[in-house]
Image (cartoon, coloured by chain):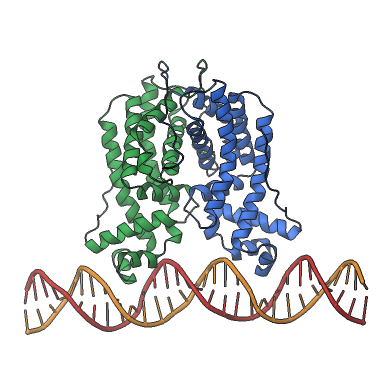
Chain colours: A blue, B green, C orange, D red
Amino acid sequence: MTVTLPAVRPPTTDTEERLLDHALTLFAEKGYEAASVREIIEATGVTRPVLYYYCSSKEDLFKRLVHWKHDEAYRELGKNVNATKGCANRLRAIMSGSFAFCATDPRVPRLMFQTHFGPTIPGISEFMAEVAKLRFMIVHQVMQEGLDAGELEGGDAASLSLIFCCIMDQHINVLVRMPKPKKRLTPELADSLVDVFLFGLGSGKRSRVSLPTFAADQ
Amino acid sequence: MTVTLPAVRPPTTDTEERLLDHALTLFAEKGYEAASVREIIEATGVTRPVLYYYCSSKEDLFKRLVHWKHDEAYRELGKNVNATKGCANRLRAIMSGSFAFCATDPRVPRLMFQTHFGPTIPGISEFMAEVAKLRFMIVHQVMQEGLDAGELEGGDAASLSLIFCCIMDQHINVLVRMPKPKKRLTPELADSLVDVFLFGLGSGKRSRVSLPTFAADQ
DNA sequence: TCCGAAACCTAACGACCGTTAAGTAGGTAT
DNA sequence: ATACCTACTTAACGGTCGTTAGGTTTCGGA
């Protein structure tokens, strides 16, 4: 599995990095629309044209920020997956790796998920969907390998990936909004959730699952 | 299982109902913040003070709208649950009932989920959390019955409910944003997803799942 | 026939938004 | 010395937002 991603110019000046960091804080707290340029530059302690000196617009500021933080997460995810063998172990690596990453700086998942799952924002939502697709494709590839190896059954790779991402992302999204997210996004929970994905929570005799085919269009 | 909910004054005038309906369309399309009062009254074909004649504010308009549509869904959900016996069947009733309701008017889940999962909006988010909790409690009660009856195992009712709602809500949230949601939110998919919840997607020998205890606070 | 409430209207209000024109201090290469 | 670039400043611009003051029409009941 190879991971390639266009590199984005990282912040050069100290001012620029502080600007991005405070933007992250405020975007994560109030969302893209509600966090105003004025608040961001005020928190940073600079004047408005400084922001426009480093970024061409509010949208550009946001995209650079997301790209920057996403690259970190994405590369780490690829590394974790490549370091393990077997579908179940790789799923565990994805889930617990994501949990760990999100626990270190909860602002990042707060920003990512609430922007992705929230109302459509022209220019931003398409960008978020593109970014999210990269992560989805990693899961998709692991699922396909699991199906090919006979470790998984019951549906196509797309359906399985969607279910897995529903459980993973929504747990992050919910738990990261609660107090002390670091105490909640534990490796133990991650592993248990993968177990649920694999084995379910019913106590009765196991019956065969058969998901309808996932139709990409129409 | 009893279902009680404070009744909300339904729209009286034809103008008021059209106002709420166009508000639903625009809120679902662009979100609470981005949908302006001007757009809503323009789509309805009235002037601005008419809106303030029926609602005390934009926030009041939104809450009345949500309360109105939620009551419909909530009552139908309770009815579906009461009409079935056994945990697995009740979960199927919840999932396929919710799918059916969302398929009839995709604007409703679009509005509900994107507002609930999106950025925090003062005055609105607390209200959405409260509304969502009502629905969660129905699932929670069914899970507790399933655990008590020995139909479920592997965790407490809260953890199980969260997993179930992650799968259900996020599937609705994702599929309802795609074209032709009515073709996607089928009873077949609903039943299959409950099967996944119960039995998992792994092909190997089943192992025992044990989720960490869900801590409500701290 | 008169009255008052319900259901609307026109026309503005002040606040905040993202953005930028125009100017300046300070270091550096020529 | 001077030309130049980077990193900033002050001070506005036009636009959209939610909201409302104040007036008009319509119409059923007394």
Task: Report the number of numbered marks.
Answer: 0
Instruction: Name the residue rendered at 31%, 45% in the picture.
Output: B104
Instruction: Name the residue rendered at 73%, 60% in the picture.
Output: A15
Q: Position of residue A129 (x, y in %)?
A: 54, 47
Q: Position of residue A151 (x, y in %)?
A: 55, 21
> The N terminus of chain A appears in which quarter of the rendering?
top right
> The C terminus of chain A appears in which quarter of the rendering?
top left
Vertical side of B160 occupied by C19: above or below: below
Left or right side of B92 for C3: left
Q: Quadrant of residue A36?
A: bottom right
Residues B60 and A16: in front is A16
Left or right side of B148 for A24: right
Q: Quadrant of residue A215?
A: top left
Q: Is residue A118 visible?
A: yes
Q: Is residue B212 visible?
A: no
Instruction: Name the residue rendered at 65%, 47% in the picture.
Output: A69
Residues A94 and D11: in front is A94
Q: Position of residue B77 (x, y in %)?
A: 30, 38
Vertical side of B96 occupied by B87: above or below: above
Vertical side of B70 occupied by B168: above or below: above
Instruction: Name the residue rendered at 32%, 67% in the picture.
Output: B52
Residues D27 and D2: in front is D2
